[in-house]
């Protein structure tokens, strides 16, 4: 009789800390020379194993709302009768005006 466990415990894999913004990772020359410090907790603590799941995980590539607002374009209407947004199909306006201005007004 053989037993098969579906979605069982993985034997290896990349640690979640390697892509977390709260991790401080130092790697040595050998594969087993790695120091991982978790900065999500107080006080910071050393992680002694590969992490599969973490409640304080924040992906490095994900931007905060503030970072997205800083890079977003601000669209404003130019003139009294114009409105911002998309035009209706079949409208007679064939001209689009795009003015790019730095956030400080230069």
Image: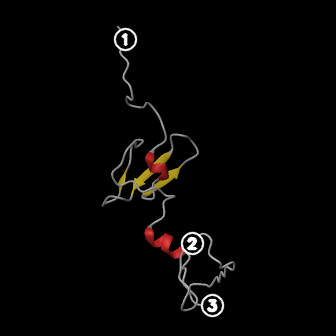
**Residue at figure coordinates x 39%, y 44% from the top left:** 48
Dot 2 corresponds to which residue?
Answer: 88
Residue density around tag 2, few if under 14, some if 14–19, many if 20 or more, within 10 Å: few
On the image, the x and y values in percent for residue 49 come to 40, 41
Q: Is residue 105 left or right of residue 24?
A: right
Q: Is residue 71 left or right of residue 8?
A: right
**Residue at figure coordinates x 38%, y 31% from the top left:** 9
Tell us which disc is closer to us: 3 or 1: 3
For marks 3 and 1, the one nearer the N-term is: 1
Q: Considering depth in this image, is 90 or 54 the residue closer to the camera?
A: 90
On the image, the x and y values in percent for residue 97 come to 66, 82
Q: Considering depth in this image, is 73 or 47 the residue closer to the camera?
A: 73
On the image, the x and y values in percent for residue 26 come to 50, 53
Looking at this view, name the residue that lies furthest to the left: 42
For marks 2 and 3, the one nearer the N-term is: 2
Dot 3 corresponds to which residue?
Answer: 106
Residue density around tag 1, few if under 14, some if 14–19, many if 20 or more, within 10 Å: few
In this rendering, the answer to whether 3 lies above or below 7 is above
Q: Quadrant of the N terminus?
A: top left
Tell me where residue 23 sits by quadrant: bottom left
Q: CA distance from mark 2 to mark 3?
A: 32 Å
Tell us which disc is closer to us: 1 or 2: 2
Tell me where residue 11 sits by quadrant: top left
**Residue at figure coordinates x 51%, y 58% from the top left:** 61
In this rendering, the answer to whether 47 lies above or below 96 is above
Answer whether labels 2 and 3 touch (C-beta < 8 Å). Answer: no
Q: Considering depth in this image, is 103 or 2 the residue closer to the camera?
A: 103
Dot 1 corresponds to which residue?
Answer: 2
Q: CA distance from mark 1 to mark 2?
A: 65 Å
């Amino acid at each position: 009789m053989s037993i098969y466990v579906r979605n069982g415990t993985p034997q290896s894999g990349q640690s979640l800390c390697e892509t977390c913004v709260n991790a401080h990772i130092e790697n040595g020359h050998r594969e087993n020379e790695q120091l991982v410090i978790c900065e999500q907790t107080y006080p910071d603590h050393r992680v002694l194993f590969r992490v599969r799941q973490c409640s304080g995980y924040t992906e490095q590539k994900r931007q905060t709302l503030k970072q997205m607002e800083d890079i977003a374009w601000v669209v404003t209407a130019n003139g009294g009768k114009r409105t911002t947004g998309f035009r209706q199909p079949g409208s007679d306006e064939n001209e689009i005006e795009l003015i790019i201005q730095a956030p400080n007004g230069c």
